[in-house]
Amino acid sequence: MSDTTVPAPGPAPGPAVPDAAAPGSAVRVWSAMRALVLEHEDRRKEVADALGMSFFRVKALRHLLPGPLSMRDLTAGLATEKPYTTLVVDDLERRGHVVRSVSPDDRRSKIVTLTPEGEAAARQAERILARPPRSLLALPAGDLAALDEIMARLLAGDEHGDARGSG
């Protein structure tokens, strides 16, 4: 007989989560930021309705705005699987939003390029998504300036893998 005990079944312990109710808690702030963008002012449905396609297809068009991409790079950028990217590109091609061509560097590789119609749709989506939330527009100028500075520091820190920023 062993004198070791077997732990009771249950969820595996995860990383410690700060108390979301604590004032100034990063968890509370992050939760509020996510709620503002993804719940209160979620424009994904508006974009999908305006363009008559799923938001994921719109996301593919937006990824192509900077220029043509290989199917492999588009798949990676969309964080999806190759068969799903093929399905999405097939549909976008049928709609006249993209064209597929053989890569001049590797005949096994396909390049996806926006058509003028696809570029117009992607830019329309960008305009809708870029519209600031009403609550942000209602902030006093000083609060907006402070938030702008904080967001710039957060984004600068994110580029370095931390939140130190330059301030």
Image: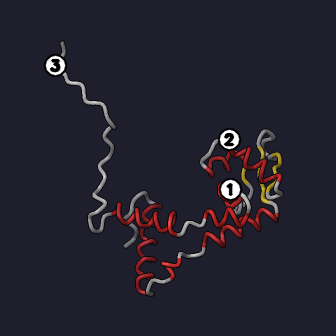
Q: Quadrant of the N terminus?
A: top left
Label 2 sits on a secondary structure element that is: helix
Q: Quadrant of residue 157?
A: bottom left
Label 1 sits on a secondary structure element that is: loop
Q: Quadrant of the C terminus?
A: bottom left
> Of 163 and 126, which appears nearest the observer?
126
**At 39% across and 59% down in the image, what residue appears?**
162
In the rendered image, the residue lying farthest to the top is 1
Numbered circle sitting on residue 150? none
Spatial separation of the CA atoms under disc 1 and disc 2: 18 Å
Can you say whether 6 is above or below 103 in the image?
above
Return the disc, 1 or 2, that comes first in the chain's sequence: 1
Return the disc, 1 or 3, that comes first in the chain's sequence: 3
Q: Position of residue 148 (x, y in %)?
A: 46, 77
Q: Which residue in the structure is indicated by mark 3?
A: 3
Can you say whether 49 is above or below 139 in the image?
above
Tell me the amino acid under the disc marked 2: Lys
Tell me the amino acid under the disc marked 3: Asp
Q: Position of residue 54 (x, y in %)?
A: 68, 56
Question: For mark 1, does the 10 Å Cα neighbourhood hold few (<14), some (14 to 19), or many (20 or more) residues?
Answer: some
Question: For mark 2, does the 10 Å Cα neighbourhood hold few (<14), some (14 to 19), or many (20 or more) residues?
Answer: some
Q: Position of residue 123 (x, y in %)?
A: 71, 69
Q: Which residue in the structure is indicated by mark 2?
A: 82
Return the disc, 3 or 2, that comes first in the chain's sequence: 3
Tell me the amino acid under the disc marked 1: Ser
> Would residue 32 be found to the left or right of residue 116 on screen?
left
Q: Quadrant of residue 116?
A: bottom right
> Of 69 and 88, which appears nearest the observer?
88
Image depth: mark 1 or mark 2 in front? 1
In the rendered image, the residue lying farthest to the bottom is 141
Numbered circle sitting on residue 54? 1
